Image (spheres, grey):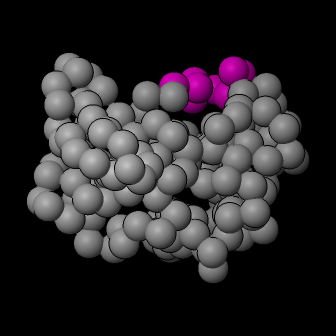
Amino acid sequence: MSAIVIKNRRNDSTLWEGEAESRGAAALKAFASGVNLTGADLTRANLSDAALRDADLRSIRADFFDVLMVVPREVGGLRAALVEGRIDGSTYTGDCACLVGTIAHVAGLDHCKIPGLKPNSSRPAERWFFAIQPGDTPETSQVAAITLEWIDQFLAVAGEPAATA
């Protein structure tokens, strides 16, 4: 075990510090002790075994829905990539890519040229996708499972738009 400090990514204040085996384990300890991790820099934290069902994820979900509203025609393709384990939250390019990268791939565009959507690794939705790795599916990853629920909620309200010609 080593000493780990979790800081706020906006103002660099310390949110939690203590002994843990990894950044993911530290995040779990902090959450379990009641620490509010809003704004926490959890870069490189593996949360694959985290119990996230009771976490307050509203700001992440709202930001994710903001993204989906910009690209409604690509949501079905994003959903398929998630279900098939073709998300890699660490990269904007390739067959397995992050949120914006996957949307770009589905749209047949460069990730920097999606109208109304620019890559921003600080936005909550993109940080959330950082926890999804190639091969992760809703059956093997809580983050992917929650994300699939959100996509299905979005599609239930917004409907499945017709594909562009």
Quadrant hosting residue 12? top left
Q: Residue furthest left?
A: 34
Inspect this view and state whether residue 22 appears.
Answer: yes
Residue 165 position, x and y percent, is 87, 47
- Looking at this view, is 157 or 56 the one in front? 56
Residue sitting at x 38%, y 57%: 25
Q: What is the span of residues highlighted in magenta in the rendered image?
A: 112-120
Q: Residue furthest front?
A: 1
Residue 145 position, x and y percent, is 54, 72
Q: Is residue 66 left or right of residue 77?
A: left
Q: Main secondary structure of the magenta part?
A: loop
Q: From what the image shows, is residue 30 above or below residue 12?
A: below
Quadrant hosting residue 78? bottom right
> Quick check: is 114 in the magenta stretch?
yes
Q: Across the whole image, how many numbered discs are drawn on residues?
A: 0
Residue sitting at x 70%, y 34%: 91
Q: Residue furthest bottom?
A: 139
Residue 133 position, x and y percent, is 67, 53
Q: Is residue 31 left or right of residue 79?
A: left
Residue 19 position, x and y percent, is 28, 48
- Looking at this view, is 65 or 33 the one in front? 33
> Quick check: is 151 in the magenta stretch?
no
Q: Is residue 11 left or right of residue 71?
A: left
Inspect this view and state whether residue 80 appears.
Answer: no
- Looking at this view, is 68 or 17 the one in front? 17
Residue sitting at x 58%, y 26%: 119
Q: Is residue 165 left or right of residue 145?
A: right
